[in-house]
């Protein structure tokens, strides 16, 4: 944080980036009714919060989703934290619509959630706090359905707009730091983001990371699998791996008839 910069606050959310005016000029908050209409990396505002069995997929695919239930990347990472994280505050880094921040509160923690996207943070805050009790879900091209948010409001989350590579918190502030599906969105900044997030973990605390490794690198012959490279990077930072799950299904509903399944790698690592 720089004492010479005035950090604006939008709808109660502080914008804590080095160039807040620049970020606000790039952002067009076009309304909070639909994630689809805003610059948000999610198909709608409630899907990231739902167990896969509730996504309404038809037929045998729907039966498979019901069997998967809630066993996605967020559940895997929350499991590592439940097993290993000491008591204390938690932060959902690159929170998007903040599904992990909601779990963090459910697990009894004071939670923080931040993202570089102002739209994401405003929608997350609206949906989680109950200020946006109804959201629009795309059903097909040009089709929208109004859906009541299917969970109780959660008020104990502190929100900010911030860059994971330069987070606006003192080092070692959190017992649990989560990077959920963020590394794939950061392009060649993934190392800065990983190190920025890891820096927030207190001694004895846990870093949890989920990634599909969809876009990290161009393919190259002989390169080790990205899971190994990530584990090496985490090891180089001095963390001890305490949990890993290699093929965790992650499901996104895009339209009523379109569902995307990706396999995620999930890891939990303790700072000594
Ligand atoms: C695929 S979404 C995942 C959102 C959420 N973590 C989840 O698991 O549903 C990736 C998010 O990372 C955010 N992001 C990318 N780079 C970031 C950065 N440097 N700092 C903070 N957030 C970032 C994007 O804005 C986006 O909301």
Image (spheres, helix red, strand yellow):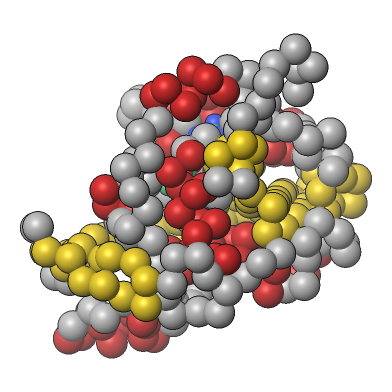
Count of marks, rendered view: 0
Q: What quarter of the picture does the N terminus occupy?
A: top right
Name the residue at 37% across, 53% down. Answer: 32
Q: Indicate whether 11 appears above or below 68.
A: above
Q: Position of residue 54 (x, y in %)?
A: 36, 82
Residue at left offset 55%, top offset 39%: 10
- Residue at image location 52% in from the left, 70% down from the top: 130
> Where's residue 160, x and y in %?
63, 42
Q: For this rendering, which residue is in front, 186 or 262? A: 186
Q: Residue furthest top?
A: 4
Quarter holding the C terminus? Answer: top right
User: Which residue is at the front of the view, 176 or 2?
Assistant: 2
Q: Position of residue 257 (x, y in %)?
A: 14, 70
User: What residue sits 37% from the left and 71% below the top?
Assistant: 134
Question: Please, is residue 155 above or below residue 240 in the view?
Answer: below
Left of 254 or right of it: where is 135? right
Q: Residue 50: name its quadrant.
A: bottom left
């Amino acid at each position: 944080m720089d004492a010479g910069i005035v950090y604006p606050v939008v709808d109660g959310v502080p914008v804590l980036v080095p160039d807040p005016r620049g970020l606000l000029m790039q952002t067009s908050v076009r309304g909070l009714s639909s994630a689809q209409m805003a610059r948000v990396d999610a198909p709608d505002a409630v899907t990231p919060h739902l167990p896969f069995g509730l996504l309404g997929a038809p037929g045998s695919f729907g039966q498979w989703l019901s069997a998967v239930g809630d066993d996605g990347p967020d559940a895997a990472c929350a499991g590592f934290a439940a097993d290993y994280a000491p008591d204390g505050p938690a932060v959902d880094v690159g929170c998007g619509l903040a599904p992990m921040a909601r779990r963090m509160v459910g697990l009894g923690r004071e939670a923080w959630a931040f993202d570089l996207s102002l739209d994401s943070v405003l929608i997350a805050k609206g949906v989680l706090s109950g200020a946006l009790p109804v959201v629009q879900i795309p059903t097909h091209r040009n089709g929208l359905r109004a859906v009541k948010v299917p969970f109780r409001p959660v008020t104990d989350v502190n929100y900010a707009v911030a860059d994971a590579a330069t987070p606006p918190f003192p080092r070692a502030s959190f017992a649990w730091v989560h990077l959920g599906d963020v590394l794939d969105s950061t392009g060649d900044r993934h190392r800065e983001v990983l190190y920025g997030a890891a820096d927030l973990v207190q001694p004895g605390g846990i870093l949890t990371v989920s990634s599909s490794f969809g876009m990290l690198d161009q393919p190259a012959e002989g390169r080790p699998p990205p899971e190994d490279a990530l584990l090496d990077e985490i090891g180089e930072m001095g963390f001890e791996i305490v949990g890993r799950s290699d093929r965790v299904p992650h499901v996104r509903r895009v339209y009523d008839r379109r569902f995307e399944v990706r396999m995620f790698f999930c890891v939990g690592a303790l700072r000594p």
